[in-house]
Amino acid sequence: MSDRARDLARVILLMSFDLSALMGYTGAVFLRCFGSGVGVAASLLGLAAWAALPLALGFRAFKARNL
């Protein structure tokens, strides 16, 4: 897993446990962006795309090589 995906997963975890108050102004911005259900859904969709796109490209490349 890349660093960006780990960071996004950490932000989702922080928002789900209401730990954004411990992060100061950054936590307030994160809460505003990712605090709602739509924000969590968008970030989870982003994580899924981050994993699915390289997987699909890998399958396509291996299928073309007949390995």
Image (cartoon, rainbow, N blue to C red):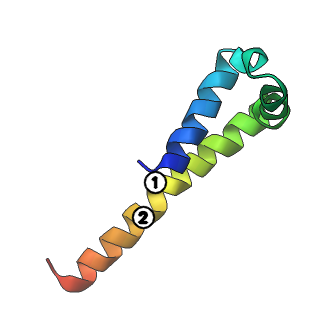
User: Tag on residue 54?
Assistant: 2
Q: Position of residue 66 (x, y in %)?
A: 16, 81
Image quarter of residue 14: top right
Q: Quadrant of the C terminus?
A: bottom left
Mark 2, Cα crowd under 10 Å, few <14 / some 14-19 / many 20+, is few
Are there few (<14), some (14-19), or many (20+) residues within 10 Å of tag 1? some
Do the numbered discs 1 and 2 sit on residues whose CB atoms are within 8 Å?
yes
Work out whether residue 44 or residue 17 is closer to the camera in this orientation and state it.
17
User: Relative to 18, is 39 above or below?
Assistant: below
Residue denoted by label 1: 51
Q: Nearer the viewer, residue 22 or 37?
A: 22
User: Where does residue 46 sit, x and y in percent of width and height?
Assistant: 61, 50
The answer to which of 45 and 14 lies nearer the viewer is: 14
Residue occupying the far front of the picture: 24
SS state under label 2: helix
The kind of residue on which mark 1 rests is Ala
The image quarter containing residue 23 is top right
Going 46% across and 54% down the picture, which residue do you hit? 51
Asked if residue 26 lies left or right of residue 41, the reply is right
